[in-house]
Amino acid sequence: MKRLCALLLILVCFLGISACKKSGEDKVFTSYVPPKTAAVNEDIQVDETNHITIVDTKTITPNPDKPDEKILIVTYDWKNGSGSQKVTHGSFLMTAKQDGVALQPNLKHVDDKFKLVKPIQGGETLKGIQQGFVLLSDNDVTLSIKGNMLVVFDNGVPKGSYPVEVSVAVN
């Protein structure tokens, strides 16, 4: 009986090891690698399924009595390239920096806040989404747009994902 158990154990181990045999070629993982920088009016693919096009930026002074308090309004289009219905939240994140400092978001002066949470089907584009940011100065602003991927594979090497940066002049 011991011989039979030993023989079965050896057979199971042999089959397990042979099933793990490599076919001679190593598996190389790949993914979409977004660009580091982009420009206004450019189709920016931020991950495997999300495309952003910044179509306009404008600076407003909401309170004429406080001319130093300015808001940057960024207008963009978003294409949901996935196969399912999505909203902007969870698909990508847009933030802004000026002089190395993160800008506070401000939605008080955008045309339609509800576009930020409007669901669209895969393959559709939602046009005219707006986000506002409180400016600190008249210097250029760097927008950072990060897709929903946590890791990208660059030449088979896993790396942390990163945002695409877009430089915007304050007008």
Image (cartoon, rainbow, N blue to C red):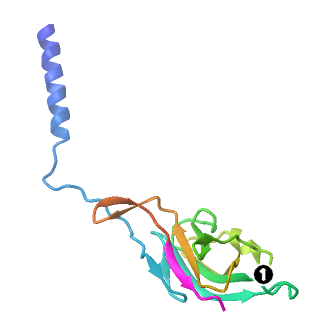
Q: How many marks?
A: 1
For this view, does 86 lie left or right of residue 104?
left
Q: What amino acid is found at the position of numbered circle 1 in the picture? A: Glu
User: Is 83 located above or below residue 112 in the figure?
Assistant: above
Residue named by callout 1 = 69
User: Is 69 located above or below residue 80 in the figure?
Assistant: below
Residue pictured at 55% horizontal, 78% vertical: 52
Task: Find residue 20 and report its image quarter.
Answer: top left
Q: Secondary structure at mark 1?
A: loop
Observer-nearest residue: 97 or 47? 97
Q: Is residue 118 at all visible to an observer of this figure?
A: no
Observer-nearest residue: 165 or 85? 165
Which quarter of the rendered picture does the N terminus lie within? top left
x and y, in percent, of residue 146 in the image: 52, 68
Residue pictured at 55% horizontal, 73% vertical: 144
Q: Residues within 10 Å of mark 1 (few under 14, many from 20)?
A: some
Which quarter of the rendered picture does the C terminus lie within? bottom right
For this view, does 104 lie left or right of residue 83?
right
Residue pictured at 63% horizontal, 71% vertical: 120
The magenta region covers 164-171
User: Is 39 located above or below residue 94 in the figure?
Assistant: below
Q: Is residue 166 magenta?
A: yes
Q: Is residue 17 magenta?
A: no
Observer-nearest residue: 170 or 92? 170
Q: Which residue is situated farthest in the right direction here? A: 65
x and y, in percent, of residue 31 in the image: 37, 65
Observer-nearest residue: 133 or 78? 133
Q: Magenta region's main secondary structure?
A: strand
